[in-house]
Amino acid sequence: MKKSGWTLLGFIFIGGLLGGMLGEILTVFSPSEQIQTIFAKSLSPGIDPPLTVNLILIKVTLGFLFKINLLTILGILLGIYLYKNI
C-alpha cells in the first residue's frame, strides 16, 4: 500500500471519529459514576457561537467546533499506529 499524507489524514480522521463515538456511547451506557466522569470530560476548541457577517445582499456564517475526549485521542493514536504498521 502506498503511503501518502492523505492516507495518514484518513486514518487519523477515522480513528478520531470511532474513538469519539465510543466515548459518547460509554458515557451514556456506563454503570459507574467514576467511568462517566472520565469519559464525559471533553475539550471543545472552535468558534462558538459561529461568526456571522451580514452584507445585506448575502449573510455568511462561519463556525466549527471540535469535541475531543480521551477515547478520541486514543483513536487518533491508534490510527497513526495502524498507518505506520500497514
Image (cartoon, rainbow, N blue to C red):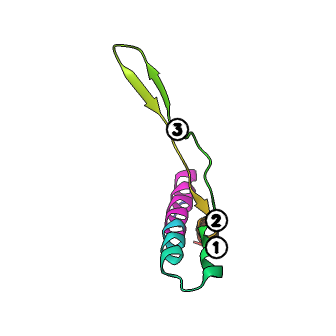
In magenta stretch: residue 48: no
Placement of 64 over or under 27, stated as above or below: above
Three-letter code for the amino acid on which mark 3 is drawn? Pro
Q: Residue tagged by mark 2?
A: 41
Are dots 2 and 3 in contact, CB under 8 Å? no
Q: Position of residue 45 (x, y in %)?
A: 62, 47
Q: Residue furthest left?
A: 57
Q: Tag 2's secondary structure?
A: loop
Q: Residues within 10 Å of mark 1 (few under 14, many from 20)?
A: few
Tell me which label, 3 or 1, sits earlier in the chain.
1
Q: Position of residue 27 (x, y in %)?
A: 53, 74
Q: Residue tagged by mark 1?
A: 37
Residue 79 vs residue 71, the one in the foreground: 71
Looking at the rendered image, the quarter that the C terminus falls into is bottom right
User: What is the magenta range?
Assistant: 3-19
Three-letter code for the amino acid on which mark 2 is drawn? Lys
Residue 11 vs residue 32, the one in the foreground: 32
Snapshot quadrant of residue 47: top right
Q: Residue furthest front?
A: 33
Point 66% across, 73% down: residue: 38
Determine the main secondary structure of the stretch shown in magenta: helix
Give me the C-alpha separation between circle 3 and circle 1. 26 Å
Are dots 2 and 1 in contact, CB under 8 Å? yes
Q: Residue tagged by mark 3?
A: 49
Q: Residues within 10 Å of mark 2 (few under 14, many from 20)?
A: some
Residue 17 vs residue 31, the one in the foreground: 31
Three-letter code for the amino acid on which mark 1 is drawn? Thr
Placement of 52 over or under 67, stated as above or below: above
Label at residue 3: none
Q: Tag 1's secondary structure?
A: helix
Give me the C-alpha separation between circle 2 and circle 1. 6 Å
Tell me which label, 2 or 3, sits earlier in the chain.
2
